[in-house]
Image (cartoon, rainbow, N blue to C red):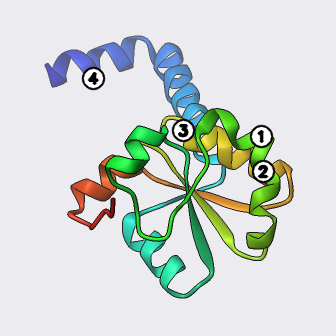
Amino acid sequence: MLANLIEFVINHYVLSGLFVVLLVALIVTEMRKGGQNLSSRELTALVNSEQGVVLDVRAQKDFSAGHIVDSLHIPYDKVAARIAELEKHKAKTIVVVDAMGQHAGSIARELKKAGYTAAKLSGGIASWRGDNLPLVK
């Protein structure tokens, strides 16, 4: 298998090089989208030092089933209309949390455009649960 891959790369070096360039461009673009990705540990440190606040953008039923302690809750589809509610937290980093990281980037990007410092929890609540960290109801 590896021999076939090496043979392909040697015979199609232009195609292989183009693939690598596009892959790197995709990774860079995804990492820039919506600000910094934070791990569960980095999120905890930021909130404990009172430099960050968690914004949970999941649906109400998901939020009620369990969320990070002291999270603010604004559903994903209501953030644009309710962004003014975050004004009192403008001095802090707003860490956007969703179910698995699928919406957090776009919300963080909106917040940054509005002048907030924003980041996102990498992997969302799923990664938080995966790290065996507590949720409150």
- Disc 3 residue type (three-letter): Ile
Q: Nearer the viewer, mark 1 or mark 3?
A: 1
Residue 88 at x, y percent in the picture = 78, 72
Q: CA distance from mark 3 to mark 4?
A: 23 Å
The vertical placement of 5 against 115, above or below, is: above
Point 17% across, 24% down: residue: 2
- Disc 4 residue type (three-letter): Ile
Q: CA distance from mark 3 to mark 2?
A: 29 Å
Image quarter hosting the N terminus: top left
Residue ID for mark 3: 27
Point 46% across, 81% down: residue: 45
Say left or right for 8 vs 63: left
Of mark 4 and mark 2, the one earlier in the sequence is: 4
The disc placed on residue 4 is none
Residue 3 at x, y percent in the picture = 17, 21
SS assignment at label 3: helix
Neighbours of disc 3 within 10 Å: few (<14), some (14-19), many (20+): few
Tag 1 and tag 4, C-beta contact below 8 Å: no
Residue ID for mark 4: 6
Residue ID for mark 2: 83
The vertical placement of 32 against 85, above or below, is: above
- Disc 2 residue type (three-letter): Ile
- In the depicted view, which residue is nearer to us: 4 or 132? 132
Tag 1 and tag 3, C-beta contact below 8 Å: no
Answer yes or no: is residue 48 visible: yes
The vertical placement of 98 against 135, above or below, is: above
Point 59% across, 70% down: residue: 53
Q: Nearer the viewer, mark 3 or mark 2?
A: 2
Residue ID for mark 1: 80
